[in-house]
Structure formats: structure tokens, C-alpha cells
Image: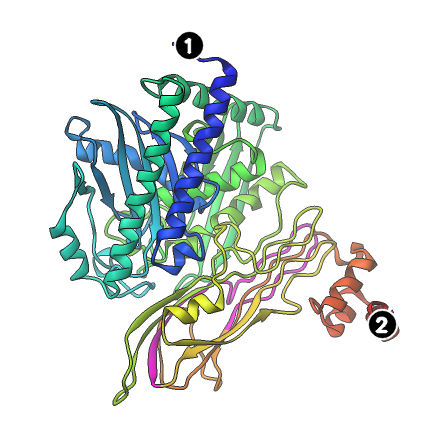
């Protein structure tokens, strides 16, 4: 049967809606707040060859772009000839999944009768996988938790109970982790049912024709966008905090007639601590940066990603081999787009934003009762965001996770997850870099264990010593600041003890400004002043306003 172009387009849109329903099913059924509140997940559908055809809108680039390569690993490891209906496969291998052990990827084959026609895959960040816990303190991946090689979670519909017992015996939050795994399997089943319904509706025996249509059109559209760009080569670089020593990200971007090449030669080597990045995650975020700048409206699939070709030297921090520690691979990985944009700004001026916070402002509290006190143990992970960089024609977004795209967890959900109190959470005035367009604001947050509890606080921050840099004359964003409420200094990364009654005060970084501050419109400055985004002192310093003009701007709202 030959399908019409209209039918193929309808089915392409249907596949996108199917994987979005798949993702929403995961959000609704997941146990971990990182999934159900922050959306730290991905969902996608693949053809029988393991090529990604569509991805859900809900999810993170680090998951979905990395997961684009994952199904091929499952096909090799499981063996196509051994697959059966009702099978469910699982792994958290950092080099074959999405970069660290805390991400569990589940793959489900789809059969039409006895014929394998495709796969559904999904990934979610789980709260705990044992080991040292979520943090950068390990010296190898073996210390970071339980490794699940690619294997069957369910064999022809029967769940492997031995595997469940092994997982439960090695993690701190067994109910959450097991619940999340079943949620992953369930959301794939939702996708499978909707796909079978679509195939019945259109009388499809397989997905070969629709896959060819999707991949051919997406690939050609992406290459056409690249072909319209000016040819050139440019270098980008960025220095960030690292763990004990700074990390240098270096990248060369080359635009050719049919591809964009991105090479990270010259980047710092593998770090002794767990901030290293497997190549699959580097590729995911480098591709995302290029796609945002060049072809943002073309749906993500194997063909639309293929023209973006990413390389990095082995044993660099962005191509770390096994058994390098990789638990906090996002610390470096989330900075990759800003490094790529540094090069792209030279090739495509007026397209990319200024640098932003980049790395998520995450922390995890391992809580337990203080000595002699009653209470429960809990692992509480919370995702938070600094400010995004200003754009060529717009201010940066406040407290927005770019490039990860995850949502900030509500205070209520965080406090419900365990005995922790969030004493303060608000926007951070003056944290966005000044410019013609202002950088997005970071946040101020104060947290601590509830009464009768002590905790280990695992910090996962960057931009402490190297704040976001302005572009085209814009000012830098504010750096990260972290300390106990009593003034005790704290590190930006690593596990640190919190005694009973202690609080941690954090000021998350702001995005940088774009363009000269002298060119900012007066009404935008006045608006920011009235909203409390900037203080009178900052307006006087950055924009040269005198006290009388500031007073008039503040009164304007009252009038």
C-alpha cells in the first residue's frame, strides 16, 4: 500500500501526540518528584531498526537526544530474534543510556502478530540508586550506585522478581525506585496501545513507509536550513568552576554545505570527581544547542539530528570512558550549549543568547533523625533554576532552566517528600546582567532539616567563581553564593553535613545581559525598578540614573 502525503503527515502528527501521551502517563504515575513535578524524563517511538521517529514535547534534551541512540544498544544486547510481545527491557548504563546511573531507560518492543514493527522507549531520573548517593564525591562509577546492564525487566509479560529484590536491596528509597520503574513500563504500554490503534485505523502492517516519510522529510528540511547558512569556522571557549579545579570547555564549530561539525578538542581532561560526561550526553546537548539556533521548528528525530556531527577526544571531560565517575554529568553537560553559542555568535551574529546559569541549581538532602530523636530517613532531591541569558531582542527569562527545560519543583512537593523545610524561595534582585536586554534573575533559597533531623547536603552548583558572561557589551550575571545561615562557608559541590537546626542559604546565579546598558529603553528600566527586579542602587550604577529620575519611576506605578 502506498500512503498519500496527507496521510503520512497525519500519522506523523499522530505519533507526536502518542509520545506526548506516553510522557504524560509517566508524569501522572511516577513516584519521584523529579519526574512528576520537574518533568525530568523523555519518551519516544522508534522504527524496527531502532531509529527515533518522534519524541515527546515534555522532557529534557539530555534525556531524549541521548535516548535517540539507546534503542540500537538494546537491539544488539537483547537480540532481535529473542524478542517477544510482552517483553520490557531496562538499563541505567551511563554510556548506553543517558549519561549517569540515576537515569533508568526502559524499552518495549511493539509487535504486529509475530512481526516486530518498532519500539517505545522512555527515561526517568530516579531519586536513588544506592552507592554514595546523588553527588560528585565518588572516584569511579562503581561507587556511584547499582548498575543495571541491558536486560529483561519483563519476559513475555512476566516481571523478573529477582531483579526487583536486587534493586530493593541496594537503594535507600526502594518504593520510589520500584514505583518509577513500573511507571516507565506502563507509559511505554500506553504508547504501544495507541500505536496499534493507529496502525489498525490506517491498515498498516508495519511502520516502514511512514518511517521513510518522516526521516526523509526531516533530514532534508534540516540540511536545507544548514545549506542556507554562511560557511565558516569559529572557536568558542568557556571556563567554569569544576570540582577542585576549573574546567575549560573548548569547541570548534564548522558550517559545511550539508552538516554542522562540532569538535571539543582542547577541552579539559577527565576529572577525579563525578562531574565527567559520557559522549552520549555531550552529543545530546551540543546537538540541542545547534538545533535551537538553526532548525528549532523541525521535529526531533534521528534524521533531523544526523546533520549535527559531534566529536570529542577520548579521556576529555566531555568524552569520559568507563569507569569514570559521572553522577553529576549535567554540571558540565548543561554548560555545553553556552560554549557552542560562543562559537556560533561569531558565525551567526544576532542569533544566540548571552550565557545563562546553565547548570541546574540542584541539591539533595539525605535526612535522618538526630541522635536520640525519633523520625524517619528520607532522600529529598529538588531541582531549581538560575536565570537564563538575555536574547538578541528580549530579556532573559527569570528562574528558567535552560538548556535542560525541567520545571522548578514546588515548595509543597519538596516538603512533602521528606522532613525538610524551605524557609525562603524568591527571585534574586540585581542578579540579571545589565544590558540593552537584561539577563534573567536567579533565585534566593533557604532550606534546612526539620526539627529533630540532621542531614547530609549534597551541593550540585556551578557559577560560583565563573558567572555567566555578557554578550555584545552586556554585563555578566551574578554568581552563585552558598553558606550556612550562621555564616559557615560551604562548597559549591560535594556532600556536607547539616546539624540539627542548621539552614543553608543559597543565591542562584543570574543570566548575563545582551548589548550595551546605555542602549536599554528607559521604560524597561523603570518597569524593572517597580517590579523589584533591580534596586535603585543598581539602576544608578548600571544605567546612570540620578535619584530624582529613580523616584519619578517608582511613583509612576502609584499614579
Residue at disc 1, secondary structure: loop
Which mark is drawn over residue 305?
none
Disc 2: CA contacts within 10 A as few (<14), some (14-19) or many (>=20): few
Total count of labels: 2
Q: Quadrant of residue 374?
A: bottom left
Spot occupied by residue 84 in the image (x, y as percentages of width and height): 18, 30
Which contiguous range is marked in magenta?
452-481
Q: Is residue 50 left or right of residue 534?
A: left
Q: Residue at x 28, y 43 (%)?
A: 106
Q: Residue furthest left?
A: 162
Q: Which residue is nearer to you in this view: 441 or 143?
A: 441
The percent coordinates of residue 212 (x first, y second) are 41, 19
Q: CA distance from mark 1 to mark 2?
A: 69 Å
Q: Main secondary structure of the magenta part?
A: loop
Task: Please tell me in which quadrant of the rendered image residue 229 appears.
Answer: top right
Q: Quadrant of residue 474?
A: bottom right
In depth, the one of 443 and 59 nearer the eye is: 59
Q: Residue, x 42% and y 46% (percent of image)? A: 24
Left/right placement of residue 420 relative to residue 505 reads left
Q: In the rendering, at what x and y percent does residue 115 appear?
A: 23, 21
Residue 2: image tag: 1
Q: Is 494 placed left or right of 79 in the picture? A: right
Asked if the stretch drawn in magenta spans residue 456, the answer is yes
Tell me the element at label 2.
helix
Quick check: can you spot residue 130?
Answer: no
Image height check: is 110 above or below 242?
Answer: above
Residue 555 - label: 2
Q: Is residue 319 magenta?
A: no
Amino acid at each position: 500500500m502506498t500512503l498519500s502525503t496527507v496521510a503520512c503527515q497525519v500519522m506523523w502528527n499522530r505519533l507526536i501526540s502518542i509520545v506526548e501521551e506516553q510522557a504524560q502517563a509517566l508524569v501522572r504515575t511516577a513516584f519521584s518528584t523529579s519526574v512528576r513535578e520537574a518533568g525530568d524524563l523523555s519518551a519516544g517511538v522508534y522504527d524496527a531498526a531502532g531509529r527515533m521517529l518522534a519524541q515527546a514535547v515534555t522532557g529534557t534534551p539530555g534525556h531524549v537526544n541521548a535516548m535517540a541512540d539507546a534503542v540500537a544498544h538494546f537491539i544488539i544486547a537483547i537480540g532481535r530474534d529473542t524478542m517477544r510481545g510482552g517483553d520490557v527491557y531496562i538499563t541505567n548504563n551511563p554510556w548506553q543510556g543517558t549519561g549517569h546511573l540515576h537515569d533508568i531507560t526502559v524499552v518495549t518492543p511493539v509487535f504486529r502478530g509475530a512481526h516486530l514493527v518498532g519500539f517505545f522507549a522512555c527515561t526517568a531520573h530516579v531519586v536513588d540508586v544506592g552507592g554514595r548517593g546523588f553527588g560528585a564525591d565518588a572516584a569511579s562509577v562503581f561507587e556511584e550506585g547499582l548498575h543495571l546492564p541491558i536486560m529483561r525487566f519483563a519476559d513475555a509479560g512476566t516481571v523478573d522478581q529477582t531483579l526487583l529484590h536486587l534493586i530493593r536491596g541496594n537503594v535507600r528509597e526502594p518504593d520510589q525506585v520500584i514505583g518509577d520503574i513500573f511507571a516507565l513500563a506502563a507509559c511505554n504500554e500506553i504508547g504501544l496501545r495507541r500505536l496499534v490503534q493507529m496502525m489498525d485505523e490506517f491498515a498498516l502492517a508495519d511502520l516502514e513507509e511512514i518511517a521513510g516519510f518522516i526521516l526523509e522529510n526531516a533530514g532534508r528540511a534540516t540540511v536545507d536550513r544548514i545549506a542556507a547558512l554562511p560557511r565558516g569556522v569559529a572557536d568558542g571557549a568557556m571556563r567554569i568552576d569544576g570540582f577542585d579545579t576549573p574546567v575549560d570547555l573548548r569547541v570548534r564549530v564548522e558550517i559545511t554545505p550539508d552538516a554542522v561539525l562540532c569538535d571539543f578538542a582542547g577541552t579539559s581532561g577527565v576529572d577525579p570527581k563525578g562531574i565527567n560526561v559520557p559522549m552520549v550526553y555531550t552529543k545530546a546537548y551540543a546537538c540541542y544547542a545547534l538545533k535551537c539556533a538553526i532548525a528549532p521548528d523541525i521535529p526531533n528525530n534521528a534524521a533531523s539530528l544526523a546533520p549535527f556531527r559531534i566529536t570529542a577526544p577520548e579521556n576529555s571531560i566531555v568524552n569520559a570512558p568507563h569507569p569514570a565517575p559521572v553522577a553529576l554529568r549535567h554540571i558540565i553537560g548543561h554548560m555545553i550549549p553556552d560554549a557552542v553559542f560562543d562559537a556560533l555568535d561569531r558565525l551567526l551574529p544576532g542569533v544566540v543568547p548571552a550565557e545563562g546559569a546553565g547548570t541546574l541549581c540542584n541539591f539533595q538532602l539525605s535526612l535522618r533523625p538526630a541522635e536520640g530523636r525519633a523520625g524517619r530517613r528520607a532522600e529529598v532531591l529538588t531541582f531549581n533554576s538560575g536565570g537564563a541569558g538575555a536574547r538578541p531582542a528580549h530579556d532573559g527569562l527569570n528562574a528558567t532552566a535552560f538548556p535542560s527545560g525541567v520545571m522548578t519543583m514546588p515548595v509543597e512537593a519538596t516538603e512533602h517528600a521528606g522532613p525538610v523545610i524551605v524557609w525562603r524561595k524568591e527571585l534574586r534582585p540585581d542578579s540579571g546582567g545589565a544590558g540593552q536586554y537584561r539577563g534573567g534573575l536567579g533565585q534566593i533559597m533557604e532550606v534546612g532539616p526539620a526539627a529533630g533531623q540532621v542531614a547530609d547536603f549534597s551541593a550540585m552548583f556551578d557559577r560560583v567563581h565563573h558567572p555567566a558572561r555578557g554578550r555584545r557589551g552586556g554585563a555578566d550575571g551574578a554568581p552563585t553564593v552558598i553558606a550556612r545561615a550562621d555564616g559557615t562557608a560551604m562548597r559549591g559541590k560535594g556532600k556536607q553535613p547539616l546539624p540539627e537546626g542548621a539552614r543553608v542559604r543559597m543565591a542562584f546565579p543570574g543570566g548575563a545581559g545582551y548589548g550595551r546598558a546605555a542602549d536599554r529603553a528607559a521604560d524597561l528600566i523603570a518597569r524593572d525598578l517597580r517590579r523589584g527586579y533591580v534596586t535603585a542602587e543598581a539602576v544608578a550604577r548600571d544605567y546612570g540614573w540620578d535619584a530624582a529620575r529613580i523616584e519619578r519611576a517608582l511613583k509612576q506605578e502609584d499614579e
